[in-house]
Amino acid sequence: MPLIKANRLRATAITGVRRLPALPDVPTFGEAGFPGTELLGWAGLCAPASTPAPIVSKLNELSLPVYLDPKVRPNLERQGDEVCSNTPSEFTAFSQQEITRVTRLAKELQIQPGR
């Protein structure tokens, strides 16, 4: 994002499903004529699968306000991040869905891991 804002790099399209508030004039790949090419970069707070549900809920309860804090969220959004507030089960479903989708896409495009 800093390189784009400094005019050292030109953004031609966004890989997400909607435009970024930080780059409102940059179209999505779908808008640019390449529908179905969405590729999201995402992150979440994770814990080992064996972590008891009450602890996972508590981690979510304590961390979510940080991301939504008016002093933190604008900084994330300026970098092009989209902050969402979901439950642990919603995040698990989303991440599994994305892993399945991207794995299928990599196989279709015959993309191999780097060596």
Image (tube, rainbow, N blue to C red):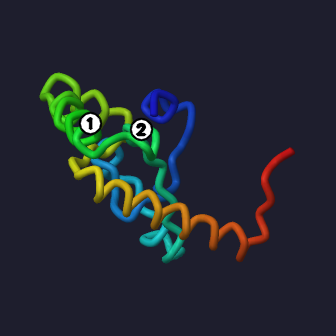
What is the three-letter code of the residue carrying label 1?
Ile
What residue sits right under mark 1 in the picture? 55
> Would you call the spot at circle 2 few (<14 residues within 10 Å), some (14-19), or many (20 or more)?
few
Q: Relative to 59, does residue 20 appear above or below in the rendering?
A: below
Outermost residue, right direction?
Answer: 115
What is the three-letter code of the residue carrying label 2?
Ala
Q: Relative to 4, does residue 38 appear above or below in the rendering?
A: below
Quarter of the figure with the C terminus: top right
Q: Which mark is residue 3?
A: none
Residue at image x 54%, y 70%?
Answer: 101
How far from the left and from the top, in percent, is residue 1?
Answer: 45, 34
Q: Nearer the viewer, residue 86 or 3?
A: 86
Mark 2 vs mark 1, CA separation in Å: 9 Å
Relative horizontal placement of residue 4, taking residue 65 as reference (left or right): right
How far from the left and from the top, in percent, is residue 111?
Answer: 77, 63
Q: Relative to 115, does residue 106 appear above or below in the rendering?
A: below
Given contact means CB atoms under 8 Å apart, are the residues at marks 2 and 1 in contact? Answer: yes
- Check disc 2 and report its element: helix, strand or loop: loop
Q: Earlier in the sequence, mark 2 or mark 1?
A: 2
> Would you call the spot at circle 1 few (<14 residues within 10 Å), some (14-19), or many (20 or more)?
few
Single out the mark in the foreground, 2 or 1.
1
How far from the left and from the top, in percent, is residue 97?
Answer: 45, 67
How far from the left and from the top, in percent, is residue 32?
Answer: 48, 69
What residue sits right under mark 2 in the picture? 47
Residue at image x 35%, y 46%?
Answer: 23
Relative horizontal placement of residue 93, taking residue 98 as reference (left or right): left
Outermost residue, top direction?
Answer: 71
- Check disc 1 and report its element: helix, strand or loop: helix
Residue at image x 49%, y 65%?
Answer: 38
Residue at image x 27%, y 46%?
Answer: 53
Q: Nearer the viewer, residue 75 or 29?
A: 75
